[in-house]
Amino acid sequence: MDIYISNPVTKLHLFEAEAIMRALAKYFNEDEEAWGIIGLLHDIDWDLTKDNQKEHCVKTQEILRKAGANDFLIETVISHGYANEMIPEFLSRQRSSRIQHSLVAAETLTGLIIASALIQPDKKLASVKPESLKKKFKNKAFAANCKRELILECEKASIPLDEFLNIGLKALQEISGKLGL
């Protein structure tokens, strides 16, 4: 990750996605390390592609293949880009597994949670309450770039929205020191 990601904000986002994916793995009784790594690597190409989003996830395949990653890891990591109109190569692809739905929901949820923390008077994750996060989710004007339909893919992973929001919030609160929030 340190080879490809230098932007500190991107690194924080990767740590956030890792934390939520680990929490989801625990919830589903899956391999926490494997799920965490998938969250950590999901935007490994972002510094290279942020100015040309048609290449996002496409470059990820090259980076992970070069590093010796297996097909499962590569497909799972790039699946968060499936059906994204910005990535023509992936327009016709669909997420099909619990881990793929969890990844796209988790990495999108990070934005909603962080935005919720930043509007708190103390700007701390500890001040965000689950019921407040749910209200923010329903308010489409709040953190408008967080695509609610992607967060709702948690339900395709067999986890109710309220529970998913709680798991994600708790996961980020647990690493708040690392995030400076």
Image (tube, grey):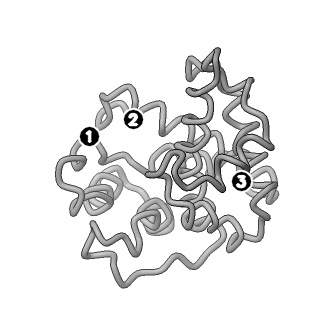
Tag of residue 10: 2
Circles 2 and 1: CB distance less than 8 Å? yes
Residue placed at 56% from the left, 67% from the top?
Answer: 149
- Mark nearest the camera among 3 and 2 is 2
Quadrant including the C terminus: top right
CA separation in Å, label 3 and label 2? 24 Å
CA separation in Å, label 2 and label 1? 8 Å
Tag of residue 31: 3
Residue 22 left/right relative to 10: right
Q: Residues within 10 Å of mark 2 (few under 14, many from 20)?
A: some
Answer above or below: position of 180 versus 56. above
Q: Earlier in the sequence, mark 1 or mark 3?
A: 3
Q: Residues within 10 Å of mark 1 (few under 14, many from 20)?
A: some
Q: Tell me the kind of residue under disc 3.
A: Asp
Q: Tell me the kind of residue under disc 1.
A: Asp
Quadrant including the N terminus: top left
Q: How many marks?
A: 3
